[in-house]
Amino acid sequence: MPILVMKFGGTSVATPDRIRRAAKRVGREVANGYDVIVIVSAMAGETNKLVEYVEETGQFFDAREYDAVVSSGEQVTAGLMALTLQEMDIPARSWQGWQVPLKTTSAHASARIEDIPPANINTKFAEGMKVAVVAGFQGISPEGRITTLGRGGSDTTAVAFAAAFGAERCDIYTDVDGVYTTDPRIEDKARKLDRIAFEEMLELASLGAKVLQTRSVELAMRYKVKLRVLSSFGEMDDTAGTLVCDEEDIVESNVVAGVAYSRDEAKMTLISVADRPGIAAAIFGPLSEAGVNVDMIVQNISEEGRTDMTFSCPTDQVPRAEKAMQAAKDAGEINFHDLVADTDVAKVSVVGIGMRSHAGVAAQMFRALSAEGINIKVITTSEIKISVLIDRKYMELAVQALHDVFELEKAG
Amino acid sequence: MPILVMKFGGTSVATPDRIRRAAKRVGREVANGYDVIVIVSAMAGETNKLVEYVEETGQFFDAREYDAVVSSGEQVTAGLMALTLQEMDIPARSWQGWQVPLKTTSAHASARIEDIPPANINTKFAEGMKVAVVAGFQGISPEGRITTLGRGGSDTTAVAFAAAFGAERCDIYTDVDGVYTTDPRIEDKARKLDRIAFEEMLELASLGAKVLQTRSVELAMRYKVKLRVLSSFGEMDDTAGTLVCDEEDIVESNVVAGVAYSRDEAKMTLISVADRPGIAAAIFGPLSEAGVNVDMIVQNISEEGRTDMTFSCPTDQVPRAEKAMQAAKDAGEINFHDLVADTDVAKVSVVGIGMRSHAGVAAQMFRALSAEGINIKVITTSEIKISVLIDRKYMELAVQALHDVFELEKAG
């Protein structure tokens, strides 16, 4: 039998009634001839409640115990989903991470998947089981303790299962009906994409689009797992949602696939740094060691041996960055006049694999922003994306202007 | 290091604050020089919520999935208790049933403990861990699936650990401060017992006293585990609570240790049964097969080859008993005129190991009830208890009269 992986997020299993509705979708795929692996999240709100319990015990907690506590939410939904399927006369059973076993590293609270031996579940499929319901987000460490994969880990679990079992497709059921050209809350002309390439999805996910977790897209790209994002609340329809797939499976597309934004980026400027060979390493080495995820970097033209160095990082890492820079200065490793943090900025990006073969996208983007009177503070580009840092108050305007200029409301 | 087992029930771990209070009691015993095994229940209300979820999926559910779902409550408290202890600088870690492993039969939802190999936990004690926090009520089946021990299974878990680890004592922390001569809500002269014999506790537990689960007392008796019942809300005091122990550890005691009652018993009467050899087997065989727990049995004097047969069983098993009797009649196995169920009765019992050596307890009991005008419907006795079935409206009166006549307010 061909295998299908179906993943249901927290809002899709938030109540017993919603679990029933999700189970009907699973039943439909069983009727279509699939053996199905269902990956479930915890009921919406449940994981937050468990995390709060843990945080109430103290500021610094043992990640191994954190994992034992927070993994219980998925365990509950997995059992309830199996029971609901059985009630519909579909042979099903639940599997917790350690029962599969989904083997991970020992990095508790942010473990990485190492291996998913398919033997146990395949034996049950061979015996007539039609659905394996697996608790998402969790596995077992080499020491035999429960690990979790970090937030969004259920998407990653689903893709990893699809890869391990050679599934025909991995369907991610969520509360939105697909991937859009941009956030419809900001641009009402935003259009749902039928298909998007892995690379594009990866850029969009890491640039702030929240529909899929970055790690799950990376994994899908590496193992060529066809990923479909669709709503668990819409019609049951084989063409619903957005298919995230290999570039070559996309016949026609716009140069720009989508516009992403993020409010969580801060702009940091080191004023009057002594410019010398190796200065970049002296700055970004300590930042990296302090766990600061630096995104964009701009170095001004050097004057009289001194320069300004600007970089961006997530807003919540600003204190960490400041501490690391002050320490490097105190240690005499770098020398600067001041460190200025500007958290009142936003990052807006355009993404599209078509940019590889089309020149002029950057120029078109900068012109469109300029026409709206929006000043660009920092720019970074990759082969398939261009990101700019701008004043936060212009964010919505920028998204709308870029959606317009690249005509994203029209299918490619 | 001597080992102590401490078990905290659902009300004792109902909130993070109560978990902290329980952890302080654990810390005190660690300071006293013990290696401690803590058994925790789920937060009060949590298991009921999970059971409701399961029941919402359908009337007949897979007990294996039920177990996977409901065992999650203890998993959460075990992690939180370990974290709270760590915050108090006490080396602790949590263990789920399958991690210990606590091996059980495959009888899901009412599994029996088969083995608790102490090696894993003892290794950690040897490495300096001071507290092993174990999720109560659960284990692992030979098939590698999570099992639960049935309601009250956390008490049983605690006693089984005490036996497996040769613990000095097993302290059961609950919301009452010990075992009383009778329910203080009915008789305000009820007195807390300092000590009670296993046999007495066993009778009281099975006769309706809710302080300890019957199976846990049986187990404690078999393995000579000293059991202490005490409140997790009272003062920290080494002499608090009631010690359930071997008869020979009790120096002086009353003839009657306590008075128990139960409202959950129904009186069933088969009217005009054809009296012939083997008739009792023909009646009680089918009842037993139907899962009816028959307690008391009375057969009236036979007249003209017919008799009335009266028995008692838990109220919620009355429909099952009626169905079984009707089926036996339809199959021609028994013959009776009518089956009358009287659910408006109560069972009141006096229990005491002193009854073995003191005659006249029964006569004293019947006289006391008679003096209050209470009619006795059915009587059963064992070596250390006498139970009577009476009209439910006289239950409180009967308990008070018996408490008085045996002078239970005075220490023996």
Image (tube, coloured by chain):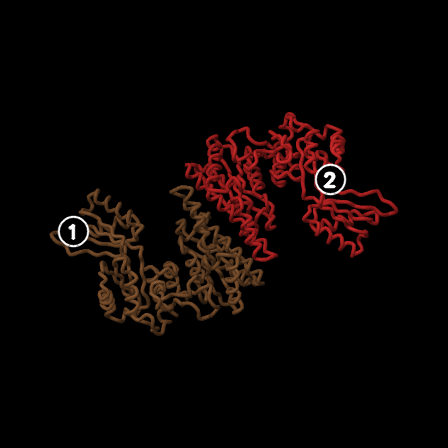
Chain colours: A red, B brown
Instruction: Give the residue type that dot 1 points to.
Output: Arg
Question: Badge 1 sits on which subunit?
Answer: B
In percent of the image, x 72 and y 35: which residue is there?
A: A386
Residue A155, above or below B412: above
Question: Badge 2 sits on which subunit?
Answer: A
Judging by the rendered image, the residue that carries numbered circle 1 is: B276
Q: Between A324 and B190, which is closer to the camera in this rendering?
A: B190
Residue B276 on image: x %, y %? 16, 51
**Crowding near pointer 1: few (<14 within 10 Å), some, many (20+)?**
few
> Position of B202 compared to A278: left or right?
left
Q: Between B362 and B30, which is closer to the camera in this rendering?
A: B362
What SS does tag 1 mark? loop
Judging by the rendered image, the residue that carries numbered circle 2 is: A390
Q: Which mark is residue B223?
A: none
Image quadrant where one finds the C terminus of chain B:
bottom left
Q: Between B302 and B225, which is closer to the camera in this rendering?
A: B302
Residue A141, above or below B355: above
Residue A59 on image: x %, y %? 61, 57
Of tags 2 and 1, the one toward the viewer is: 2
> Position of A204 compared to B224: left or right?
right
In percent of the image, x 30 and y 67: which residue is there?
A: B403
